[in-house]
Image (cartoon, rainbow, N blue to C red):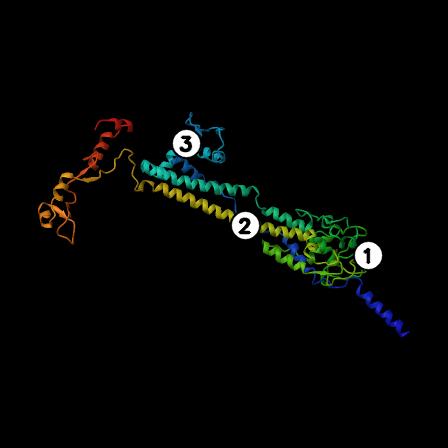
Amino acid sequence: MRTVQVALLLADIVALAAAAPTNDENANVYPPFCALLQLGDGSSVVEPELDPSPTKPEELFNLNMTVADPAWLSSLVDLKDPNAPKAKEKPQQGEDTVRDKMWSTWTTAAIAIATKDSNGKSGIETMKDKYNLNKANAAQLNELRHTVSKLADRAFALYEAADKTGAAAPPTDAQIKETINEALYGVKAQSTPLDISKLFAGRATTYQAGCEGSETTVAKTVGGVLYFLCAAANSYATGQKSCGQGGPTMPTWEAGALPLPTTWHEMRKYCPVEKTEKLTAETIDAKLGSAMKQFKPGTSSLYIYKEGSGACDGSSNNVCFKLTTSSNPGNADDYNKLQWIAKLKQAAKDIRQRTKASQKNRDTKLELQRLTEEAQIAAQRAYLSPISSPNKDSKKQPQATPDPEKQKACDRHTNKTACEAKSCKWTSDKEETGTHCKPKDGEGQTNKAGAGDGTAGEQKKEKKCKGKLEDACTKAPE
């Protein structure tokens, strides 16, 4: 008899262990999911903010075109109507990678400096005044042309690379928030009232059908998970509150149907609306990590519950979430199968991608600014450069050669005293006899071809040639 009583007592204990939901059994489980839900509350700002893509360094390109060879400008723009310059068609003959790539940039800059303002002043005149270019001579402008051209080429390469990257622009605030909302509610934008059907992967008609099974049937959202932790099946009617006995009445599912939309208001009493001021990758990671710690591995299932066993029916058994997995549950693939986890990870990844893109944009803009400023400084100081205009016809300075007669006169003396007496130079410090008698420096020397021209000769020629074409000057008699 005693044996029977013990057996009945044990049966009662087992039944009690797997009995209907009790007060507070999920009180320590559900809060991390509320924290996730709050990621979608209010008009949060995603940080860091998305830094805009760099803009084309037009000032540098226009300056480059201003100091360029005028013939090049003419090859880019049709100036038949000085009041309406037009870009010329890109030449089709031959293959020119640089020309093909930069033609649009070149012609845009060419039109900008060729266009006249309301006062009839062209862009090139404005640029020359702005950078003191009218004070520079031809040689100074030529040096500046090469300097600015290199800076412009570097800037174009940087801008082009940034422009290509911008074609695959990182997600915006709105897109990141849409991904988060999909994780929380199954939709990109919350609706009022909430569409309960979007919270679950399958057509869940009962509590147990939506909380137990594979990733294709169970809750696919954070909101759906909360409906298994803090709500009960329709058949449950004991008045217990699994998420806290001090909370609101425990919401229930409909008979053979999803919970009514009005129950969401009761659910949010467990999870008060609390705006997340700043959405960062670190915030999402931390909140998701806390929620994932609530998983408990079972034999071939993952539970969101205080333990990893039992059935989840929200009535005669546990109020919990149960994901059917492999025989060794708990690996990364099991978690990533759940859409809400995958979506939140994607949102954090998008913010990190955006952070990198923003930093690259800032770096590129700073470098473009540096290149532009370097070109501007070079232009403003060009007229101060010590370079003078090269004279293609300038002759080399005449080289002095010894006078043969003077050399012979000095060579006759093999004695130091006699040598110096004849106004020659004795070149040895050790010997007073020998062949050391030479003409003094500057004496007995003549200039090669063009003797007597020297600097004065060149200046005379320069004065005579002033205002004449080079060929005419060259042919003019001396």
- 136 or 252, nearer to the observer: 136
- Image position of 66 with respect to 54: above or below: above
Alpha carbon separation for disc pair 3 and 2: 40 Å
Q: Are marks 1 and 2 in contact (CB under 8 Å)?
A: no
Q: Amino acid at mark 3?
A: Trp
Callouts 3 and 1 close, C-beta under 8 Å: no
Looking at the image, the residue that sits furthest to the right is 1
Q: Which mark is residue 125?
A: none
Q: Residue at x 89, y 74 (%)?
A: 2
The single residue placed furthest to the top in the displayed view is 80
Q: On the picture, is 166 further left or further right than 271?
A: left
- Decide: is 287 above or below 51: below
Relative horizontal placement of residue 463, taking residue 379 as reference (left or right): left
Q: How many marks?
A: 3
Label 1 vs label 2: CA separation? 52 Å
Q: Give the foreground label among 3 and 1.
A: 3
| Residue type, numbered disc 1 | Ser
Which tag, 3 or 1, sits closer to the chain's start? 3
Residue 472's spot in the image, x, y percent?
27, 26
- Using the image, tell me which numbered label, if any, was put on residue 356: 2
Mark closest to the chain's N terminus, 3 or 2: 3
Left or right: residue 428 versus residue 189 is left
Q: Earlier in the sequence, mark 1 or mark 2?
A: 1
Residue highlighted by disc 3: 72
Label 1 sits on residue: 235
Q: Residue 119's x, y, as percent?
A: 38, 31
Q: Residues within 10 Å of mark 1 (few under 14, many from 20)?
A: some
- SS category of the residue bearing label 1: loop
Q: Secondary structure at mark 3?
A: helix
Nearest-to-viewer mark from 1 and 2? 2
- Mark pair 3, 1: CA separation: 86 Å
Secondary structure category for the residue under label 2: helix
